[in-house]
């Protein structure tokens, strides 16, 4: 586990409003644009927090033995490769304990995410190995140390942590994956140790999610203000929040601008939203029409725009060491991918996706970033696809198009929507060539009539 996290000082004070002269309309507009970019990832994170807590109590692990499909709309760019486990951890009263069994010859991971959408750490194949383990997840106010019999400690600057597990699935008849889900355990520390539980705290209710990609842009600020007190902001973040407080954005503040400032703040927030959307389309440099997930994925630091762009495009992006996500929006000719055309993606035998665990290619609607319904219920292709056929020389050709190809090609067909689409190539446990950028997927070629 990351020992640096365990030793991190988290005794930051929350920013407080200071009596200052009201900003001018232009200053307010600029502050709102900057605040929108800063707050976007946390507010978009609320979409999943709202969805999960509406169905589950806090500190309850829910594992679902099914692959996600087009009816699942709470997370953009979901994978179609793994069973998901999920929980929202409330760490205000005491730490939570995640227990995992020995997992041999199968990829799995648990990703722990704070309110800024940073990855705190991982438990799983790469990070902790295949053996059984017991891991303690503690919030910023916990003063204890790791008890005996535990495998690791993960400290969080947030009182609220999103836990997302992924367990590899090898087809519809993979019963082993479903059985494994039953062996994951989440419990409060007091229960594991057989000690008295701490006094119950006021029930924590997350704010109702307000769509960030549509509607009034300033709605985002109220969501952020409600969640922000649950995070310990570092000094650089506190300095920004002190400035944003001038327009009513900050932990626990009421966002209610009035008069001449209201219009300026609304314009600034809308400008911030446009900035995030634009950045999501160019989140990293392109090569062969593919853009890699940012190298800072999951650890964005002070790069607020990349953090926001990642949340817009594919929130909860993994660390590059865990999974690498090249995304293609354009073909070899630089044109946006569309179901009005037919495409081929050819991997030469010596350029197959370099993944230590497995790889997949998944189709998404370009506007919603959701999986696309199709008549054969196929949303991804990869090295575990049973009907996939390699070329005679060991290479691989995939067919990306709306209408079905010739019968002999249908095992390699990834159905596309009628409109614009994009595809994500996921490499689980990518090789060094993928992580360093020396490997790039081949360009997607339009088929000429």
Image (spheres, rainbow, N blue to C red):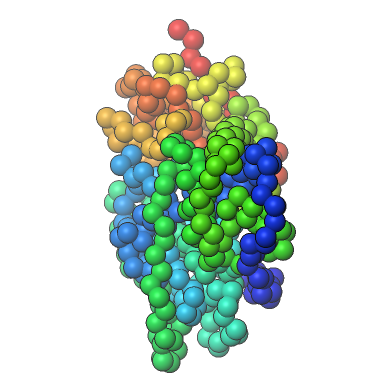
Residue plotted at (54% across, 28% down): 329
Which residue: 54% across, 47% down? 257
Task: Name the residue nearer the viewer: 258 or 131.
Answer: 258
- Outermost residue on the bottom side: it is 195
Q: Is residue 365 left or right of residue 173?
A: right
Residue 249 x/y as whole percent: 58, 53
Q: Quadrant of residue 54?
A: bottom left
Q: Is residue 256 above or below residue 105?
A: above
Residue sitting nearer the eye, 78 or 170:
78
In which quadrant will I find the N terminus? bottom right
The residue sitting at 53% across, 82% down in the picture is 150
Residue 186 is situated, as x and y percent measured from the top left of the image, at 41, 73
Left or right of 130 on screen, residue 387: left
Residue 281 visible in image = yes
Tell me how many marks there are: 0
Q: Single out the residue that lies furthest toward the left.
A: 375
Residue 188 percent location from the top left of the image: 43, 79
- The quarter in which the C terminus is drawn is top left
| Residue 406 position within the rendered picture, expressed as x and y whole percent measured from the top left | 34, 19
């Amino acid at each position: 586990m990351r020992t640096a996290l365990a030793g991190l000082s988290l005794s930051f004070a929350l920013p407080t409003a200071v009596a200052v002269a009201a900003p001018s309309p232009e200053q307010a507009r600029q502050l709102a644009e900057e605040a929108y970019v800063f707050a976007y990832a946390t507010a978009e994170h609320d979409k999943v927090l709202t969805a999960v807590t509406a169905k589950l109590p806090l500190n309850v692990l829910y594992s679902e033995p099914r692959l996600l499909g087009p009816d699942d709309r709470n997370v953009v760019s979901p994978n179609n490769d793994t069973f998901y486990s999920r929980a929202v951890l409330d760490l205000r009263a005491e730490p939570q304990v995640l227990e995992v069994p020995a997992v041999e010859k199968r990829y799995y991971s648990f990703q722990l995410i704070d309110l800024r959408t940073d990855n705190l750490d991982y438990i799983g194949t790469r990070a902790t190995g295949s053996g059984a383990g017991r891991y303690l997840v503690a919030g910023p106010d916990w003063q204890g140390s790791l008890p005996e019999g535990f495998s690791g400690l993960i400290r969080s600057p947030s009182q609220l942590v999103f836990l997302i597990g992924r367990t590899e699935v090898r087809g519809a008849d993979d019963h082993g994956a479903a059985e494994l889900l039953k062996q994951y355990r989440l419990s409060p520390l007091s229960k594991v140790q057989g000690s008295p539980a701490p006094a119950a705290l006021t029930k924590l209710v997350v704010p109702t999610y307000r769509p960030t990609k549509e509607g009034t842009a300033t709605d985002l600020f109220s969501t952020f203000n409600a969640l922000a007190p649950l995070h310990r902001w570092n000094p650089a973040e506190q300095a920004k929040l002190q400035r944003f407080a001038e327009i009513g954005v900050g932990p626990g503040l009421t966002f209610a601008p009035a008069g001449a400032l209201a219009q300026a703040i609304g314009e600034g927030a809308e400008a911030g939203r446009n900035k995030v959307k634009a950045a999501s389309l160019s989140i990293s440099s392109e090569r062969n029409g593919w853009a890699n997930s940012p190298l800072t994925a999951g650890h964005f630091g002070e790069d607020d725009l990349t953090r926001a762009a990642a949340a817009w495009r594919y929130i909860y992006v993994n660390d590059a060491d865990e999974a690498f996500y090249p995304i293609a929006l354009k073909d070899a000719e630089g044109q946006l991918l569309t179901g009005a055309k037919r495409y081929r993606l050819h991997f030469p035998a010596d350029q197959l996706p370099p993944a230590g665990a497995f790889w997949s290619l998944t189709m998404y609607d370009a506007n919603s970033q959701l999986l696309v319904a199709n008549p054969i219920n196929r949303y991804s292709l990869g090295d575990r696809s049973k009907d996939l056929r390699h070329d005679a020389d060991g290479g691989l050709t995939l067919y990306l198009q709306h209408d079905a190809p010739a019968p002999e090609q249908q095992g390699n067909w990834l159905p596309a929507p009628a409109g614009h689409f994009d595809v994500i190539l996921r490499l689980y446990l990518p090789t060094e060539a993928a992580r360093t950028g020396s490997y790039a997927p081949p360009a997607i070629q339009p088929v000429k009539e």
